[in-house]
Image (cartoon, rainbow, N blue to C red):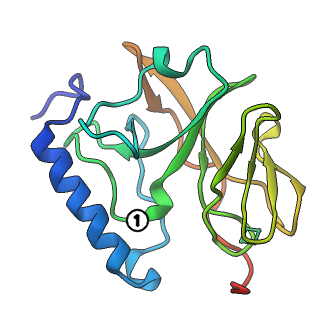
Amino acid sequence: MQSETSPSLSRRRLTAGTASLCCLTLLPSHARGKTPSLAVGDFLMPVEEKNGACLTESQIRNSNTAIMCWPVSAQTHQPRMETPYNRLWVMRTHAGFRGYSVICQHAGCLVSDWDSATHRLTCPCHGSVYDVEHDGAVVGGPAPLPLPFATIAVTDGYLRLASDFSAKVGGHASRAD
Ligand code: FES
């Protein structure tokens, strides 16, 4: 049985994971799946991470940043890249560390813009704005529902998922574009 205490991924594993990501971008959206498959206890790896290192509290504790991450299985140490619906924006809020879905609740675009001053996430497709300090509440634009989030705990300095998403992830209207 593999240990859960070694969250750093080997370069070889990351390379394999990156290859998977490249494959994902070539697949039509219906083939990628829209059901998140993360699990409580997962580590979190920044999508820009090149060496497979998982996110630590010290990297984000004193900043207003939000970091887009893949969940990483605590059992296999593999990033869960099977669907883009697994990605989360990870940040510190007044309620603690949280991971918000990157999929807009309007029509499923990527919620790509983080405002560190207001702690709001914005979807550029039609301008939906979500307030991460108020459980992802919609404060602008056409999104009909708050942005789902997962709670995050700190274990031995590493950020790890402490819950599933708070609600169904994904667009709730037909894509207009
Ligand atoms: S898909 Fe995000 S605002 Fe429309």
How many residues crowd around disc 1 within 10 Å: few (fewer than 14), some, or many (20 or more)?
Answer: some
* Residue for point 41% across, 57% down: 37
- Residue 31 is situated, as x and y percent measured from the top left of the image, at 38, 82
Q: Please tell me whether residue 48 is drawn above or below residue 9 in the rendered image.
A: below
- Residue 104 is situated, as x and y percent measured from the top left of the image, at 68, 64
Q: In this view, does 92 lie to the left or right of 51?
A: right
* Residue for point 43% across, 74% down: 33
Q: In this view, does 65 lie to the left or right of 124?
A: left
Q: Is mark 1 on a helix, strand or loop?
A: loop
Tell me the quadrant of the picture where the N terminus can be found: top left
Q: Which residue type does callout 1 highlight? A: Thr
Read off the residue under disc 1.
83
Q: Is residue 159 left or right of residue 21?
A: right
* Residue for point 60% across, 52% down: 101
Q: In this view, does 4 lie to the left or right of 69?
A: left
Q: Please tell me whether residue 79 is drawn above or below residue 25 in the rendered image.
A: above
Picture quadrant where residue 82 is located: bottom left
Picture quadrant where residue 4 is located: top left
Whether ligand 1 has any atom under 8 Å from the Cβ at mark 1 is answered as no
